[in-house]
Image: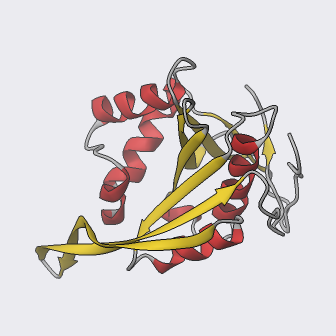
Amino acid sequence: MSSNVASSSSTETVYLRPLRDDDAEAVRRAFTGSSGMSLEGSVVDLESAQTYVRTRADAASPLHGWAIVGGDDALMGLVSVAADEDNATGALSFWMSDDYRGRGLTRRAVATVADWALADDGLVLDRLELEHVASYRHAGNIARAAGFLQEGLLREARVVEVHDGEDVVIVREDVVVYGRLKDDPEPIVARLEMREG
């Protein structure tokens, strides 16, 4: 795999590994502990977390989940690629548990998984796409740091719950679209190690 360099400014070991069935409880905690996670899927209990994990851990599935884990092998976040092999394209998505945000690990994980998905010894895709709601500007910073270029804006494309005190308001949000091609310049960001097991 190209450019998968293990590098960290701290002594903590962080790496990527395939998502496993025993990650379901950590996924449940991440989804139920943060209001923003509803954009990433519907996980409300252990059973729905197990389903979420199974769809990303099954080797036969076109959805490939890479867990971001620390030295204790506990799940901190996730980067997934939904591959469309017929068109050699994929849709990349990511999330990080609240406790681990702000360390620069997400951009490193996204860049690493994007490299793998586009590599000849990875998914052999020609193009990756990444989308985020416009109000989540941090996701755009992550996308650009991982080598994605902004390609467009889908006006009012997503319905989003906004928490206003005790009230929940449903609003329509614009979606920002990014793309990264196989032959685009590689981003200048340290990569994480990818471990197969």
Relative placement, left or right, of 170 versus 71 is left
Residue at point 38%, 28% (across, down) = 50
Residue with the most extreme top position: 60
> Against 134, is 26 above or below?
above
Relative placement, left or right, of 71 versus 131 is right
Along the line of sight, which residue is nearer the eye, 191 or 24? Answer: 191
Residue at point 75%, 28% (across, down) = 196
Relative placement, left or right, of 168 versus 29 is left
Q: Position of residue 117 (x, y in %)?
A: 69, 41
Identify the coloring. Answer: secondary structure
Q: Position of residue 181 (x, y in %)?
A: 69, 55
* Count of marks, rendered view: 0
> Against 87, is 193 above or below?
below
Residue with the most extreme front position: 87
Write down the quadrant of residue 178 in the picture. bottom right
Quadrant in the picture for the C terminus? top right
Q: Position of residue 41 (x, y in %)?
A: 33, 47
Residue 190 shows in the view: yes
Relative placement, left or right, of 43 versus 137 is left
Along the line of sight, which residue is nearer the eye, 137 or 52? Answer: 137
Residue at point 54%, 30% (across, down) = 86
Write down the quadrant of residue 156 in the picture. bottom left
Residue at point 68%, 45% (across, down) = 126
Quadrant in the picture for the N terminus? top right
Residue 80 shows in the view: no
